[in-house]
Amino acid sequence: MELLFCHRWILLCFKREFTEAVAIRMWEACWSNYLTDYFHLFLCLAIIAVYADDVIAQDLRTDEMLLHFSSLAMYMDGQLILRKARGLLHQFRQFPKIPCTLSGLCKRCGPGMWDSGHHPSIECVGHLDDETCALAMD
């Protein structure tokens, strides 16, 4: 599935989707590196979780999804998105096992005094038959 609308959100740092004040709050949440260095991905996931019902109900094609999410610019509830993203991060950190493709979300670029050391077990999934996982346990 092509998630071009998410690419735009990240590329433009949510500046076209939210008012300046809300975008700055979102940037601050991302820059704080609280529990992950990838909070921007949780923001994208939160937007999809909150506003994707129409996409699913109408079975929109990729180009129609792009148009749908573009039309939501400046109409989305930024506070709701921030709360949802924090909730999704909390849920993610409760998982005892995650796929190897998401293992990087548990790593931080630098040490953080707030990091509780989330270390779920890693399950190797989604590899081609001839592809070996770098995280595979021997």
Image (cartoon, rainbow, N blue to C red):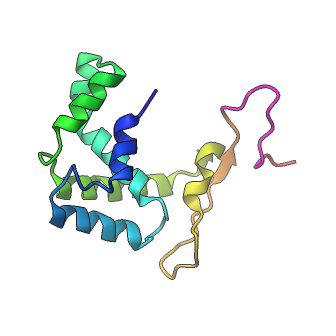
The residue at the point 26 percent across, 58 percent down is: 83
Instruction: Name the dominant secondary structure of the magenta segment.
Output: loop
How far from the left and from the top, in percent, is residue 21? 16, 66
Find residue 120 and report its image quarter: bottom right
Q: Position of residue 23 (x, y in %)?
A: 23, 62
49 vs 62, nearest the viewer: 62
Vertical relation: 60 (above or below) 87: above
Q: Is residue 122 inside the magenta stretch?
A: no
Q: Which residue occupies 38% across, 66% down?
A: 30
| Residue at 24 percent of width and 20 percent of height | 57
The reply to whether the magenta stretch includes residue 129 is: yes
50 displayed left or right of 35: left
Q: Residue 111: image x %, image y %?
A: 58, 79
Q: Is residue 132 above or below residue 26?
A: above
Residue 75 sits in quarter: top left
Q: Position of residue 96 (x, y in %)?
A: 58, 52
Q: Which residues are magenta?
A: 126-135
Q: Residue at x 21, y 26 (%)?
A: 54
